[in-house]
Structure formats: structure tokens, C-alpha cells
Amino acid sequence: MPPASTGASTLIVAASTQSSPVAATVPAVSERLEPGRPGYRRMSFALFAAGVATFALLYSTQALLPAVSASFGATAGQASWTVSAATGALALCVLPMSALSERFGRRQMMTASLAVAVVVGLFVPFAPSLGWLIALRAVQGAALAGLPASAMAYLAEEVRPKALVAAIGLFVAGNSIGGMSGRILTGWIAQAWGWRAALGAVGLLAVACAIVFHLMIPRARHFTPGSLNPRALAKTVGGHLSDPLLRRLYAIGALFMTVFGAVYTVIGYRLVEAPFNLPQGVVGSIFLVYLVGTVSSAAAGKLVARTGRRGALYLAVSTTAAGLLLSLADQLAAVLLGLVLITAGFFAGHAVASSSVSRTATTGRAQASALYQSAYYLGSSAGGTLGAVAFHAGGWAGTVTLGLVAVLGVVSITLYGSRAARAERLRPSAVISVRSRPVQN
């Protein structure tokens, strides 16, 4: 395996690693799940369903923002908080939820989180005001916080290292399907019966996904519970934050999501205005481009095998930047193609970065994944809010400028990581050459 995509030292995957801060013995790598082995298909299908429910619920109001603004007399920036509150709460709660998963188990935490989020989702359509809607969405985001990091840790523990990128890619593909189906569903239902009915439909979709997940997810065979030790948790988190590679991966995830959050929070406002003047149902159907994300995230493993992790990241960044620039055109076909490129680049970059975190952290994997998810969803919150502000100030060009600045950040971090990796590879040979010199009297 080549060095990680941000350019740090070669990743080492320990066969007997436990993700809890408390050391434990786990079964051999040969016993873990991989394509073709019993349980792998059930695991993939269950986590795919969980990914669908997570993104369908988390971004359920995003395609409805123009309708929400009209209903409550709110600006784009105010309505965007119905998305940012959910993603922000998730970002803040994902680390403590991951700590609970160390004690009570990944499977149990994912099941409980999904159940609570689904119940809250059934109340969301009845919010009497924008404030109540934002508050319920924040609670929903906090409930969902137990799922992403626990899912990543579950995969890291239960799946063979060589199959990890592909397995995480399928989970991310479920996210893309959930984001797409939720937005399309809400768009057409909102056009016919209003945004409240649309949110109710998303809630029912999530109920079905939660049932599928509960019935299909295999029991964890490689998990050993740890104690809820705040000092051990703080030490583990501090260790991850002191790792330069992990810090770069966290920053990359946040910046990629800043672009994605900004674009998809604002695109609805752009398309319902001149020169496009599209109806709500058609605007919701625009999110069919999420299918591209399904393909690009699932194919991330093959992309890494061909180009290396840094090469895959550079390709994802270039694709995203090209899509942003293309979306500036006032032709609908150009905007759609731009969204396709942005979506493909984002999901590929996210799959590469998130899988790199799981492979880099040889201890405290749940906390490492939780920190990535925190950065990722903070980027979503920042992107949604700042993207709406930029749109209000400078139109779509303002939102694109924000996205390009974030893309430039990813490029800078990756280039820095490449130089760090190069320097690290040269350092041992330099030491050897010094030691091999004859002693000068």
C-alpha cells in the first residue's frame, strides 16, 4: 500500500489492533469479513441502509429551503440553519457517542442512534415555527452522531484491511443514495402537498431503513468492550490530534465538505430564480446527480490501487474545481455537468480520506473516526451557512469562490503532506550515509 493520500509515512495496519483505548486481544485478520465470505453481503446491505437513512434524515430540509423560507418569511441564511443545526450538532456529539460505543458496542450504538433519529424525524414535520424546526433538527443531528463513527470503527474491526476501502466506499455510497432519494422525494412531494408532507415521507423512508438495518447487521465478532475512562479517552484523542497525518486528513474532510455543503445548500435558490425558474419538483430531481457519488465512492478503492492515495486526492480535487468553474455558466446543461463533477470529486475524496483515517489509527479507531466525522460535519455546517451568506452577497459566483478557496486548501495540505513524506523517506538514508562515513581523526 502506498503512503496515505496526504503524504505521511506508509500506513501500518496491525492485525491485532483493538479500537478501544484499553488493550485487548482480537481474532486474527484471517477471520475478518471480505467479499465472498459469509456475512459480508449482509453487513454491506445493512450499512448501506443505515447510510441511506443517515443522509436522508440529516439533509432532509436542504432541497426544501426555498419553500421553508417562503413559509416562515426567512432569508436563505436563516433557513440554512435547518441544515447547519443538524450537521453542527452531529459534529459536536460524535466524539462522546463514539466513547459510548467503546463501552456498549458499535452495533448497539448504531441501532440506538438510528432509532432515536427516526422517532424525532416523525415529529419534525409538525414544527410550528422556524425556531422549533431548527431545534428539532439539532436534536436529530445529535441522535445521528452515534452512527457514522461507530460504523467506521465497526468496519475497521470486522473487515479485512485490504477490503476496507471498498467496504467504506459502499457505506459512503449509501450516504449518497440517501442524500439523493431524500431530496428527490421531498422535492416532488413538496410541490404537490407542501414541505411538511415531504419531511413526513423522509421520516417513513428512514423507518424502513432502520428496520432493514436491525434485521441484517451481523453481530460484532471482533469487538471487546472498554471502560468509560475520561483520562484514557482524553489521552487517545490527544494522541490522534498530535498525529500530523490525521490532522491533515481531518482538515481535508472538513474542506471537501465545506464545498459540498455550500453548493447543495444554495443550488436550490439559484435554480428557482431567473434564468432557470425551475419548479420545486424539478429542483429536487437535480439531486439525481448523487448517483455519480455512489459510483465514485464505491470505486475509490480501485482508484487508490491505480494512482495511490495522493494521486486519488489530486484527481478528486481537480474534478471538484472543474465542476465549480463550469457551474458558473447560465446554461442549465453546464450547471448540471458542473454538479456531476463536484459530486464525483467530493465523494471520491471523502471515501479516500475517511478510509485513510481508519487505516492510520492503530488504536482508538472509534475516536479517530469520530474526530474525522466532527471535522467533516463542521465543514458541512460552515459550508451551508457561509455558502448562503456568500450567495446573498455575491450570487452564485460568491458561493463558487468560497468553494474554490476550500479546494485550494485541500491542494495545499496535500502538497505539504507530499513534501513531508518525501523528507521522511530521505531521512533514514541520510542517517545511514552519515553512520557509514569513516571516522575522521
Image (cartoon, grey):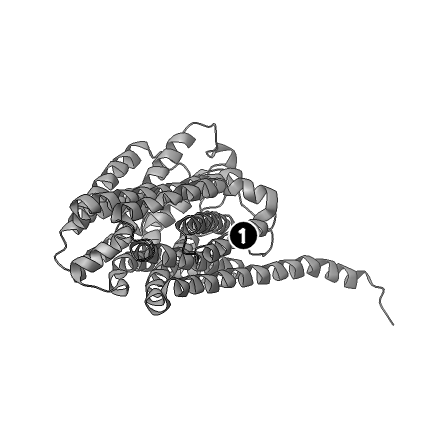
- Name the foreground residue: 169 vs 435: 169
Quadrant of res 136? bottom left
Identify the secondary structure beneath mark 1.
Answer: helix
Category of crowding for the residue at label 1, using alpha-carbon neighbours closer than 10 angstroms: few (below 14), some (14–19), many (at least 20) = many
Quadrant of res 290? top left
Is 313 displayed left or right of 428 in the figure? left
Q: Can residue 168 be seen in this view?
A: no
Give the residue drawn at x 46%, y 33%: 33
Q: What residue type is labelled 1?
A: Leu
Q: Is residue 33 above or below residue 331?
A: above
Q: Where is residue 282 drawn, in percent x and y? A: 29, 45
Q: Quadrant of the N terminus?
A: top right
Q: Where is residue 91 drawn, in percent x and y? A: 34, 58
Task: Please count the marks in the image.
Answer: 1
Is 358 displayed left or right of 127 in the figure? right
Q: Where is residue 42 drawn, in percent x and y? A: 37, 31
Residue corresponding to mark 1: 313
Is 170 displayed left or right of 61 in the figure? right
Q: Is residue 264 visible?
A: yes
Q: Where is residue 392 drawn, in percent x and y? A: 32, 67
